[in-house]
Amino acid sequence: MAAPEFDVPKLKGYIEIPSIRPGAMEGIKSFEANEKIQEALGYPGKLVDGWEQKAVNKMGEMLRKYRSLQVFLDACVHCGACTDKCHYYLGTSDPKNMPVARQDLLRQVYRRYFTLPGKLFPKLVGARDISKEVLDDWYSYYHQCSECRRCSVYCPYGIDTAEITMAAREIMDSVGLGQKYTNEILGKAQRIGNNLGMPGPALEDTLAGFEEDVEADTGVAVKFPIDVKGAEVLLVTPSADFFAEPHVESLIGYAKVFHAAGISWTLSSHASEAGNFGLFQGSYENMRKVAMRIRDAALELGVKRIVVGECGHAWRVAYSFWNTLTGVGAGAEDKYAQMLQKQLDHSYPQPSHICEVTLDLVKRGAIALDKEANDHRIVTFHDSCNVSRGSRMGNIPGGQFIIPRELIRSAVNHYHDMAPGTTHEATFCCGGGGGLLTDDLIEVRVKGASPRANALKDVVDNHGVNFLALICAICKSQFTKVLPYYGFDMSMVGGVHQLVSTAIRLGAKE
Amino acid sequence: MSMSGLTLLYTLLFYLATLLFLAGVGYRIYLYSRTPAPLKIPTTPAPTTGVGVAMRMARELVLFESLFKSNKWIWIFGWMFHFGLFLVLARHLRYFTQPVWGWVVLIQPFGKYASFLMVAGLLGLWARRFLVDRVRYISTPSDHLMLALLVGIGLSGMSMSFVDHTDIISLKAFVLGLMYFDWQPLPADPLLLVHLFLVATLMIVFPVSKLLHAPGVFFSPTRNQIDNPREARHLAPWAAQLEK
């Protein structure tokens, strides 16, 4: 690892609120999308003439379509409750990374063009004309937000900066200013079916390789099926699970679970991606296009259940939005949604999270786990932001905290939670979510990870924790990359189903 | 009877303020209720039933639950102000009702002393705008003016309650006169005139200011949505068009 060109925060094992340092992260600019990337998504290729007025018009359009935006831009009283809640503020000290200040970048323009006092007395109410300077601030600071929703937990009105960031990104996209990382990947998912742009045959090869590896390793012929019509379960998982470490270990875990439980399952080459980057942009239409591929695949393959792998943003979209976007749950009226609903087995929640599926199998005794196999591991669990604050598992509020922990405890003997205030709905983002998992934002990512790294240091120092269990592909990639900056070994990062994979008893049903 | 210029001025001012307040807030409520929330975005863990959501909203409104989790200083000052204001406003019903309702008579002493709670809370919140660097950074001139306005209303009112009583009988006649279009003279007491002027100002700026957090909180989708997206489909009208 090359020496970083910025100061890495010193870990203390607890979280301190820094004094503000205005402008600390001002120069940060994620790479812009080129014309080809932008146009593939239906956006202008570059900043259009008269973009100022067009951006204001777009804001007006979004205010009519999204109550969240309208209410959140009006309701903030600048009380300051959110100012110390963002991991990017805690890690960078830049006041524009305080949720309220980040929102104000958009709110200032809203006030100027859409409220009477802003039109009459802009200085008094902190309203601002739209300008290149404002746009630069938007681009910089709306790409220093991972849309993790931690601020929304603490706001007395539930103002969710993620909604503001999404709106700002959508406005920028609409006038031709997009982010390379998110938009390039979104284009691939819409064109090819996964974020890597990996075509079906390459995927088949990769999966065949896993079958050989697992058989060599365990002596059991665990299958990794793809495009199998009539399978019971369609597994939709982040494409990182097909190639990245430690993600692959969890994919092997899912395959072992289905094998041991005797459930027929399949992946789909048409919908080989759970992660939906339309979420990052805040574009309903783009998010719907990606989600629609999964409905198409489910209909094509005739599956009874749709299960989602370890991926935080994917699970938010799947759990909270799929039914709205595609009618996968219950209550849709269009033809294909109704066909799908007839086809699916509604004795299971649709969609289900892989942790819901596996824990249910453990509890029913359909699979058995040997905890001792994980005795070399002392485990802690990082609640992923989008799972924690944007979704649920099971049938009670907070099931998204209980189910993964129960599953881990059924697979390991040694487990320690990190400090209260850093877990459950108060969890800190890994620092790489929401479209920030790109090397051009490495400084933001490293600094944004510091609250989590501090909480981790505490359990490492005091409980000897040597395994950070995750249920999110972005968390896995992010921590693998940034924890070494803080002196942690990247091999301590892994998936919950990696633990299951180690502990599961195979072959009983052979 | 013929009205003095002062009475005429305040009569017109209060009709104008009431009109702008009701029309402005009414329009805002109409706007919020008309604007769809296309996606399910409750901040989870969230209630899975309508009754649960009603309880969550009630805890937010009465106890400021999220703020309590967030910051104890803002919570204590904010709650002191709002609870104080609630009692003070309830007490003021005595000037709008004849005969005065029983429970309003009952809370009279609490309503009087709640004004101390209210102003102390405001001063605490205001102090934070100077003392905490993060809050200082986000404060705009209008944030300070709003606090000045509220403190001004509180102090002018308290002066009449505790220091220099105004002609409360005539004031009540003036207020009832406004309500029943039977206009009566307003006592020319400087403290009262200041108090009423500031209140009218507050009513006028309410619908175009951050005071919209009051109606806004009821419409916040992160707080008022039920967490049941797998069981019930949620679809906005404009989003339904995409399926055609």
Image (spheres, coloured by chain):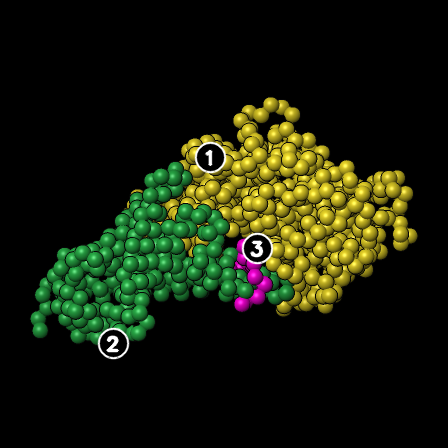
Chain colours: A yellow, B green
Tell me whether the residue at label 3 lies in contact with that at label 1, contact meaning CB atoms closer than 8 angstroms.
Answer: no
Mark identifier at residue A18 = 1
In the rendered view, would you say A496 is above or below A454? below
Which amino acid type corresponds to the residue marked 2 in the rendered image?
Answer: Pro
The answer to whether residue A182 of the structure is visible from this angle is no
Closest to the observer: A254 or A179? A254
Three-letter residue code for mark 3: Thr
Q: Which residues are magenta?
A: B37-51
**Residue topped by disc 2:** B99
Kind of element beneath mark 1: loop
Q: Position of residue A294 (x, y in %)?
A: 69, 55
Chain letter of disc 3?
B
State left or right for residue A453 relative to residue A360: left
Where is mark 3, residue-wise?
B44
| Amino acid type for the residue under numbered disc 1 | Pro
**Residue drawn 78% across the image and 40% down it:** A375
Instruction: Name the chain under label 1.
Output: A
- Please say if B26 is above or below A413: below
Residue B223 visible here: yes
Q: Quadrant of the N terminus of chain A?
A: top right
**Could you confirm whether marks 2 and 1 are on the same chain?**
no
Q: Residues within 10 Å of mark 1 (few under 14, many from 20)?
A: some
Judge by depth and name the residue closer to the eye, A294 or B211: B211
Residue B40 within the segment the image draws in magenta: yes
Q: Of the residues tagged 2 and 1, which is closer to the observer?
A: 2
Q: Earlier in the sequence, mark 3 or mark 2?
A: 3
Label 3, label 2: how far apart the Cα atoms are: 48 Å
Mark 2 and mark 1: Cα distance apart in space? 57 Å
Is B145 situated above or below B48?
A: above
Asked which secondary structure carries label 3, the reply is loop
- Within 10 Å of disc 2 (Cα), the crowding (few <14, some 14-19, many 20+) is few
